[in-house]
Amino acid sequence: MTTSSVAAPDAPAKSRGGARVAVQKFGTFLSGMVMPNIAIFIAWGIITAFFIPDGWTPVAALGGSRDGSVVGVVGPILTYLIPLAIAIQGGRMVYETRGAVVGSIFSMGVILGSDSTMILGAMICGPLGAYIIKQLDRLWDGKIKPGFEMLVNNYAAGILGFGLFLAGFFWLSKVFTGIATALGAAVEFLINHSLLPLASVFIEPAKVFFLNNAINHGVLDQLGVDQVKESGKSILFLLEANPGPGLGLLLAFTIFGVGIARSTAPGAIIIQFFGGIHEIYFPYVLQKPVMFIAVILGGGTGVLTNVIFNSGLTAPASPGSIFAVFLNTPRDSFLGVTLSVVLSAAVTFAVASFFLLATRKRDREMGNDGDMSAAMAKLQANKGRDVNSATAGLLGNNAPANTEEAATSGTTATATRVQNLVFACDAGMGSSAMGASVLRNKIKKAGIEGVTVTNKAIANLSGDEDLIITQEELTDRAKQKNPNAQHVSVGNFMNAPQYDQVVDQLKNQ
């Protein structure tokens, strides 16, 4: 078997982009609590759209009544089920079942002690309760006499849960209510003064750098469900999920782009617009940073349209597919939501096309006829951040011949046979699933057996992976989770040249 090159994180690599990586990790943790429970949001959104007094088919027993004489199920699901599900998932992520139990007790105190929806409180109290019981268990780990383990463990969790419940009910509920009220007032101010479109200045770049989860799940979901509770819909669910800007950008590359960017854009449209995997268009923006202007203006146009038409969604559109958007659109918002998608796509397309036409001649003169990977390498070099150093001279015959050579080239040598290959992304669902499917088909066509290809969230990497493929903005985080694996950075999820290099390595081994 041939020796392969592996990216090993060194001290400079760990510090590089530290703030960005930290925010990504925080956002990933938040999405790790919310994403597994998205089905509850969707079900609740459908119930809301159909059965509230202003819904498609009002049913008081389900949607409640205007005067509050009938509670229905919309309110209880939002007040209890959604926050508790998030708290349980958050507690489980920190300390498995035991953490989930204590975290849910803690969160119940916050939920019952407040008149506001406590999604934000559940996101904090669930993991915090789990962390506290985890630290408490460490105090007497291995010190309990045989036969008393269950007694001590159950009463420790129960007594701690009691104390945390009281703290949540009497104190933290007031704190979280104040935070939610302040955030709601800030959003209301932006809406009343037609300033909400300015949010795109922050949200669109955050998406491209995989920082959107901290904003989306940490703030917008909480405020969005509160708005739905009051008016049956929320514009906040469309600030990030609108597929229009990505569609407009990819259409511009389809018509006016050059090289691989142009040839891959049509397929990317299908995946982004209909599949809802927005990550597919991020490399096109990174290829030309001026495209940030296009997606920001497009996103702002979509938000402004929804503000004008007072339109919104009944639940988060996850993934951000046009199907998910329309599924969660109430009957009085179809015109506004449709126009927000169309107009945001049109503005992004117009601005992106202008920039592409202005630089078309120069792009053709670039290496590989405007190849996206060549442009990305040049972009990263200009930034002074060669994120693809991990795959420089990638794999196989270009591997360092020995450990000393590997140390001088920024890689380390390994003779590990690749059997467990993982495609990792932020949430472990959208782009990683797509990339794993593409690579799995290539491996199958090559007749290679004995290699498993799966997809995971970076936070769930276990350390037993032999080779990990990530989008280049996420590679640093993947290295921190498993520094001993081979790490491959890709820019284009659909047609990355690194996929063929990985297949060649698997053949050679």
Image (tube, rainbow, N blue to C red):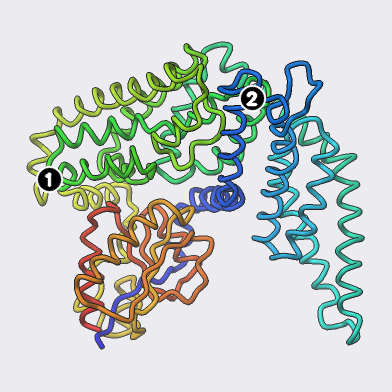
Q: Secondary structure at mark 2?
A: helix
The numbered mark at residue 481 is none
Side of 52 relative to 298 (left or right): right
Disc number lying in front (2 or 1):
2
Percent from the top left, x then y, of residue 156?
A: 89, 66
Location of the C terminus by quadrant is: bottom left
Is label 2 in contact with label 1 (beta carbons under 8 Å)? Answer: no
Quarter of the image for residue 70 reads top right
Q: Which quadrant is the N terminus positioned in?
A: bottom left
Q: Position of residue 6 (x, y in %)?
A: 34, 74
Marks 2 and 1, how far apart in space? 45 Å
| Residue tagged 1 | 259
In the rendered image, residue 457, in percent from the top left (x then y), is placed at 48, 59
Q: Amino acid at mark 2?
A: Gln
Q: Is residue 372 above or below residue 11?
A: above
Which kind of residue does numbered mark 1 sit on?
A: Gly
Asked whether, in this view, residue 247 is left or right of residue 263, the answer is: right
Residue 86 in the image: above or below residue 496: above
Q: Is residue 448 above or below residue 194?
A: below
Nearest the eye: 293 or 468: 468
In the displayed structure image, the side of residue 248 where residue 28 appears, left or right: right
The crowd level at tag 2 (other Cα within 10 Å; few <14, some 14-19, many 20+) is: some
Q: Residue at x 86, y 56 (%)?
A: 161
Q: Position of residue 265 (x, y in %)?
A: 21, 42
State the residue position of label 2: 227
Position above or below: 421 against 249: below
Circle nearer the N terminus (2, 1): 2
Quarter of image, res 361: top left
Badge 1 element = helix
Q: Residues within 10 Å of mark 1 (few under 14, many from 20)?
A: some
Q: Quadrant of residue 388?
A: bottom left
